[in-house]
Structures are given as structure tokens and as C-alpha cells.
Image (cartoon, helix red, strand yellow):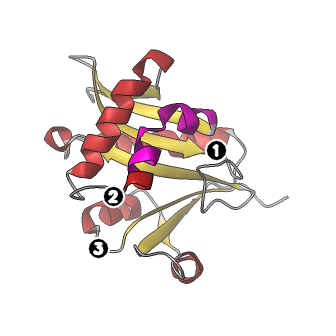
Amino acid sequence: MSDIRVRTARAHEHERVAALTVDGFRSRNSAPRPERLALLRDTPGRAAAGDLLVAVDEPSGTLIGTASLLRPGTVHARLALPDEAELRLLAVLPEHRGRGAGGALLSEGLGRARSWGMRALVLDTGWDNAVSQRVYRRLGFVRQYAREERENRHRPVKTAVFSHDLGRSRA
């Protein structure tokens, strides 16, 4: 039985979730650019755009991870097509990595996106983030090379795009 539970962040936790997101990304990147830092800290905006998920260490009640599940067409969604949800800013505190929090956040995101009636869940990660890419593949995500070519044309940081079919047919 896992000691990690995923739920929606509560409004009074938004500041803690913002700090967790910054800490989770700071460990991978030295100093985020100011516009990136603003995005990492905008937990109320990300919550309003869909669902701000948190992974909680059940024994202690500590927030150890987060991810933003976004509806298509919202301000923070950049990849999602009209029938796709988008998962962004998946972060787990460094001292809690390897315990399954990232996978639990992804699984919860898949379930919630399916409940929204979405056809797929899309996300991206760094081209060289092999650890995350292994987790995505293990959970059934497929790399979308054609979408990378479109998305990365004018971006300074290149990303790998993945999607997961949720079993919904297009309308």
C-alpha cells in the first residue's frame, strides 16, 4: 500500500505549492528566468485553468509533489488541442523522488482528464530528461515527434512531447 495520496490543492496551500514547484524545478535548473519563475509561482492561475494536484506523504501530511492539469484553451495550456487536457509543471521535492509521487500524479491526471471527457492527455519535458521520459513511457505515454517539430520551432529550450490516448473517440 502506498503512503502517497494525490488530491486537489486547497486554496490555503497555494503558497506552499508554489514554493514546492520552485524547489522541484530549481534542483534541475540553476536559476529560472523571471517569466518562468512567475509561472512556477502562479498556483491560483494554474488552479483556475484546471486542477492543481498535490502528492501528499500520508504519514506526515507533507506536500511532496505537484502537477497542473490544464483544460485546453486556458492561459497556461500551450500544447493541448481542443479535445486534450495538458499536464504541466510536474515537480517532486528532491528528497522524495523515487517513491512514486510522480507516477501517482500522472495516474491521477490521466483519470481526471478522462473524467473531463478528453480524448488524450499531453505533456512535455526536456529532451534530455531521461528519467521523466522513462516514467511517461511506463505509464503508456507515446512520444509525438511531429508535434515537437511544430512546438520547438521558435523556443529556446527544446522539449520532448508525449501524449496518452484516453480511449475516447473524436466527436
Horizontal and vertical percent position of residue 55: 35, 32
Q: Is residue 41 magenta?
A: yes
Residue at x-position 40% and y-position 73%: 157
Residue at x-position 25% and y-position 62%: 131
Task: Look at label 1 and name its amino acid.
Answer: Arg
Per the image, the residue denoted by label 2 is: 135
Q: Is residue 118 above or below residue 13?
A: below
Residue at x-position 44% and y-position 45%: 38
Per the image, the residue denoted by label 1 is: 114
Where disc 1 sits, the SS reads helix
> For the residues carrying marks 3 and 2, which lies nearer the camera in this image?
3
Asked where in the image residue 126 lies, by quadrant, the reply is bottom left
Viewer-side residue, 170 vs 78: 78
Horizontal and vertical percent position of residue 100: 27, 42
Q: Which residues are magenta?
A: 37-48
Viewer-side residue, 156 vs 9: 156
Q: With 141 as the anchor, is 167 left or right in this view?
A: right
Task: Look at label 3 and name its amino acid.
Answer: Asp
Per the image, the residue denoted by label 3 is: 128
